[in-house]
Image (cartoon, helix red, strand yellow):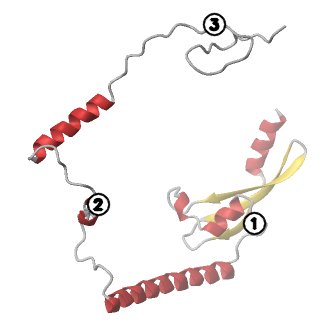
Amino acid sequence: MSRLWAKVAGLFRSKSFIGADKTGNKYFSRMEEIDGLVKEKRWVVFRREEDPTSVPVEWICWLNGQRKRAPTPEEMAELEARRERVKLNVARLKREEEERKAREGTGRKITSIGKVEGPDLSSFVRHFPPDSKGDKPEEASEEADQSRVKEHEPEIVTAEPPEPKTTEPSGSGSSFRPGTWQPPS
């Protein structure tokens, strides 16, 4: 009953505004006593519909308790600028790599988007000997299919007569029976 009362009372307690991000989400916290322990509750109120992907990583860390202090607007601006620099560096490195490949002539340039050709397997196929059975590819493939079917057929196993019991343990072969061996007395 005390937990229910604490939750109802918590709805009317004051919440403290901690901050907001650039998308307009607002972050709050309040102190609650649960089973004699005072804990800080943190939550977000979304600006539009509830979209967890709109919450920046720094605020997610604060909500989960991985950060003690909420991110400041200056910190958020600095991190955004750093992310932008990283994007520009990645674009520059890609451009330099394409230029280097064009100079060396080793890179394949993608001319169209859509279906991509598979790898050239002709050098790989040359390592295998030509099929000697059958003059036509259809005959060779039929023979190969029949040989595969024969490989997967179950073998007929005949039961061998059981070996005589010995005082020494044996653990392999068709005579093995779990729990039947007794130590010599």
Find residue 1 and report its image quarter.
Answer: top right
Residue position marked by numbered label 2 in the rendering: 127
| Mark 1 vs mark 3, CA separation in Å | 73 Å
Is 88 on the left-hand or right-hand side of 45?
A: left
Q: How many marks?
A: 3
Closest to the observer: 148 or 114? Answer: 148
Q: Looking at the picture, which amino acid does disc 1 mark?
A: Arg
Residue 88 vertical position relative to residue 9 in the rendered view, above or below: below
| Mark 2 vs mark 1, CA separation in Å | 59 Å
Q: Looking at the picture, which amino acid does disc 2 mark?
A: His
Is 115 on the left-hand or right-hand side of 20?
A: left
Crowding at dot 2, Cα within 10 Å, few <14 / some 14-19 / many 20+, comes out as few
- Secondary element at image label 2: loop
Closest to the observer: 68 or 185? Answer: 185
- Asked whether residue 3 appears in the rendered view, the answer is yes
Q: Nearer the viewer, mark 2 or mark 1?
A: 2
Residue position marked by numbered label 3 in the rendering: 164
Closest to the observer: 132 or 75? Answer: 132
Is 63 on the left-hand or right-hand side of 157?
A: right
Q: Nearer the viewer, mark 1 or mark 3?
A: 3
Residue position marked by numbered label 1 in the rendering: 67
Residue 124 vertical position relative to residue 104 in the rendered view, above or below: above
Point out residue 55 in the picture as x, y percentages from the top left corner.
Answer: 58, 64
- Asked whether residue 15 appears in the rendered view, the answer is no
- Secondary element at image label 3: loop
Find residue 120 and report its image quarter.
Answer: bottom left
Find residue 76 and report its image quarter.
Answer: bottom right
Quadrant of the snapshot with the C terminus: top right
Q: Residue at x 77, y 48 (%)?
A: 10
Q: Looking at the picture, which amino acid does disc 3 mark?
A: Pro
1 or 3: tag closer to the N-terminus: 1
